[in-house]
Image (cartoon, rainbow, N blue to C red):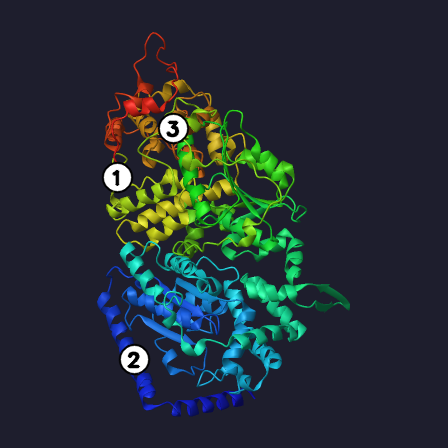
Amino acid sequence: MVRFLQLLAFAWLAARVAELDAMTLASVIGRLKMWAVSMVQRAASHVRKGTVQPSKPWERFHYLAVTYHKSGVYLMVTLWEKIFNALGTTLDDTGMWRTPPCYTLEMCWHPAAPVRCWIDMFSPELRDKEEAATGPVLIAGTVRDPLEMVVSAYCYHHRGKEVVGNMMFWPPGSVAALGPKKGVAFVAERMTQLVENMTAAFEFPRNDTHRVSYEKITRSSEDFDKQVKGLLKFWFDGLISPEEHQRALEAARLVDMHRHPEAAPEDHANDAECMNQARKAVFAMPIQLLARYRAFQRSTITITAAAAAAAAAAAIIRLNLSDQHIACSIASCGKSQAMSLRLDELRRALPRHLQERLRSLGRSDVSSTGPIVYWMRSCLRGHENPALDVAIHASAALKVGLVVFLHIEDQYPHATARRQLFLLQGARSAQEELLQRGLSHVVVHVDRHGNRGVHRMLMPKAQLVVAEEPFCVPWLRGIEELRHMGGPLWLVDCASVVPCALVPQAACHRAYAFERATEALHQQLAPRHWHEVQPEGEANAPLGWVLPQSIDLKSQHLEALVKDMDVDQSVAPVSHTCGGSSEGYARWQAWVNAGGLKTYAKRRNESLDVHGVSRMSAFLNTGMVSPMRIARLAFAASGAGKGKFLNEFLTWRGLSYAHFYHFSMPATGATLAQLPSWAQQTLLQHAGDQRKVIPVEQLRAARSGNAAWDGMQRYLVETGELHNNARMGWGKAVLKWTDSPQAAIDVLIELNNVFALDGHAPPSYGGLLGCLGLFEGPKQESAVVGKVSYKPPKSKYAAMPEVARELLKCDVQVGGIARYFETPTADHAVGEAAPKRRWTRKLESEVRAPLIEID
C-alpha cells in the first residue's frame, strides 16, 4: 500500500512538472547543469588545494540553515542567501534540499555543499547522521509557535497556494475543500511529525544549534537586528572581520519587512479574517491532538500574545487520566505543572551540554516559592556561562524570577589588594554583561568592613541555588555553608572544555592517561559554538520582596573598595593586567595577531621569552574569559604552534580541573593527602633529612641566597605572573628549604596565591603539588625529596628581573613593589619581614613608570 501511494505521488509530481512553462523548466535544467559542473569543479578544487590553510568560514565548518513549513521558510531561506552571498559564497559552496519528494526541483540541488539550507526535514536523528558524515556542523533554524504554524498553513493552503502542491496534505486540494473546524484539525494532524522534529531539535538547543525566533524577528526592526546579530555571532564569531560582519548584517536587513515592506512575498500574506476563524477552530481540535500541541508550545516557549489571549479566554480542557477527569485552564495549566516539577525531572530536561556539567546536592524537590538564585563567584562573565544558562532554564521551567548574586568576598586565605582589584574589575565587566542580556534582578555585593553575610539572608529564600563547581579553596567553604542550609543546590562546571564529570576518575593521575581518555571528546567539543540562552520574561518576574542593595561598579572607585576590605594591602595591584572579559580577549587577540600561536611550539619552553606564551591564565582561572571560546578560536586558527597550544591548554589545564573534581581537597586547604601514595610515603620517609630551612618571610622577599630562585620570586612579586616551566624549578627548591613536606605545601601555596594573579585555581594547585609529585611517577631517590624528581633552578633565571623590566617597562629598583626588596635596615634584619605598607592610589601613580600593552 505504501509503495502504491509513493508511485501515485510521483505520478502526480511528473504531471505537475509537465505543466511547468518553458522558462521555468529551462531554469530548473540550468540549475541542475550548474550543480553538476560545480560538483566536478569542487572535486578538482580539493585536489588543487592540497594542504592550503582554509580562509573562509565554510572551509572550516559546514553550515546548515533549517526551517519548517510556516515557521518562516521564505524568511530563513532569504536570510541564508543574503548573508552568505555577502560573505562571498558561490554556487559551488551552497546547496538546498527539502524533505523528499522534491516537488519543486529548484529547491533540491548540491546536497553535499558546505553551506546548505534544509526545508521540512531537519531532526535530531538527521543531525547526528550529518555530523558523523561531515564533522562539525553549525545549525541555525527558525522556530515558531506550533499552533500559529497550523493556523497559517490552513489559511495558506485553503487559498489553493503552492501550485505544485504539498505532499504533507495529500491529495491536492484537500485543505481548500475543508472549513476551519475540520481543516485546522486535518492540517494539525498532518504537521505533527514536522512540529515534533522542530521542537525536539530546538527545545533545548545544543551548543552547535541556534534558534531564531520567528515571533521576535518579525516583531520590529530592533528585534530583527537582535536576532540577526545573534545568528551572525553564532555562525561566525572569530571567523570574519568586523567589516564582513557589517556587510552581512546590512545584507540581512534587506529581508526586514518593517524596513522593506516590498520584501514580503505577496502570495504568503494570509487573510486576517481566515486567521481569526482558524485560531478559534484550534479549540475544536480533538482533545488529545490539542494537548499534544500545547506540549509543543511549552517546549518551544514561544507562545505569542495572541495565542496567550486566546488561551486565557478558552474553555476548560478536560483530559481523561485513569478514569478521573482533571480540569485546568489553558492559561494556568502549564504553570501549575511546572511548579510541581521535581528538580531531577527539570535536570533531565536541560540541554545535554548543560546536564553534563551539573551535579545536584541537597533536596531534589521544590519546597519554596522563592526565585532561582545564581551565586556568581568564580565565573566572572555574562557570556558562555554554563551556570547562568542553567539558572535561566530553571527560571523558565519553574516560572519564577531569577536573581544573580554577584559576590566578591574578602577574608579568605591569602587575599590581597592585588587580587581583589583584579576581581572587582572582572565583576564590573560581568555586571555590565548581565544587564546587557536583559536580566533585571542583578545584585552585586562586595564584602568589606561592616558589610558581610548578605548571602546568608538571601539564599534561604531561594527555590533553588545554582553555583559554580568550587573545585578548590577558597570556594569550597561557601558551598559547605550552603549545604548546611539544606536547600536544593546545583553546582555547574564552568571551567572545563570537556566537563569533568565525563572524565574517568582513573584518568586523572597522569597527563597521558587524561589525554587518551578525552581525545575524542576534545575533538568533538573544542570546535563547537556555545549556544547562549536568552532570558525569557519569567527571569525578570516580580519577586514580592526587596532585594539586598546592589553596587553599581561602573560608578564606583574600585581602589577605595579595596582599601575597605580585610585583605593584605601590602601586595599592590599590577597595572599591566586589568581584569574583565574584554581585557582578556584583547590580550588573546593581540597575542595571536602578533604570531604568538604560530610560534608557540618553538617559544613556549623559554621562560625568559615574555611573548612566547599567551599569559591568559589569570583571566581563565577567574572565569573572566570562556575556556570554550579560547579552545574554539585556537581550534579554528592555523599555524605550526596550534597543536602544541591545544595540547597544553586542553590536557594540562583540563587534567587539573578533573583531578580536583574527583579528588577534592579539604575546605581548609591542600594537604599531603592530595599527592599520590608513593609521593606521600617517600616524602614522609625523608622528612627527617637534614635541610636548610629558610623562613617564609625571607622567601617572600626574594632573599633565599639563591640568585636564580630569587630572580624568579622577584619576577612573580613584580608582575603577578610566573612561567609554568620556571614555576616548576621555583617550587621544587622550596621543598628543600622547609622543615616538613606539609610545610612545603603551605609555603608554596602562600607564595603563589599571595602574588600570582592566576592563583586560587586548580591549574595553580596542580602546578604547585606537581612540584611534590602530583601527575608524576617516582624517580631516582635522593635526600630530602626522596623519589620526587628534582632539578635545581637554572642559573639563567637570575635574569628574570630584567625580563620584568621588559614586561612592565619600569625599573624594579625604584618605586612600587620594589620596596618589597629593600635592603634590610636596623628596623628589620635579614630573615625578617619588611614592614608592611598600605598601597594607595597616590603611591601607585607616583612610583610606577608608564606601562604599555605588550600582549
Q: Earlier in the sequence, mark 2 or mark 1?
A: 2
At label 3, counting other C-alpha atoms closer than 10 Å, the crowd grade (few under 14, some 14-19, many 20 or more) is many
Q: Residue at x 25, y 59 (%)?
A: 53
Secondary element type, mark 3 = helix
- Residue 565 relative to residue 343: left or right: left
- Residue 10 relative to residue 34: left or right: right
The numbered mark at residue 755 is 3
Vertically, is 230 above or below 262?
above
Residue bearing mark 2: 36
The C terminus sits in image quarter:
top left
- Residue 476 relative to residue 582: left or right: right
Looking at the image, the residue that sits furthest to the left is: 48
Cα distance between the residues tagged 1 and 3: 21 Å
Image location (x, y in percent) of residue 131: 42, 65
Image location (x, y in percent) of residue 211: 46, 62
Q: Quadrant of residue 374?
A: top right
Q: Residue at x 36, y 25 (%)?
A: 572
Judging depth in this view, the residue of 400 and 358 nearest the camera is 400
At label 1, counting other C-alpha atoms closer than 10 Å, the crowd grade (few under 14, some 14-19, many 20 or more) is many
Vertically, is 699 above or below 192?
above
Q: Earlier in the sequence, mark 3 or mark 2?
A: 2
Vertically, is 138 above or below 799?
below
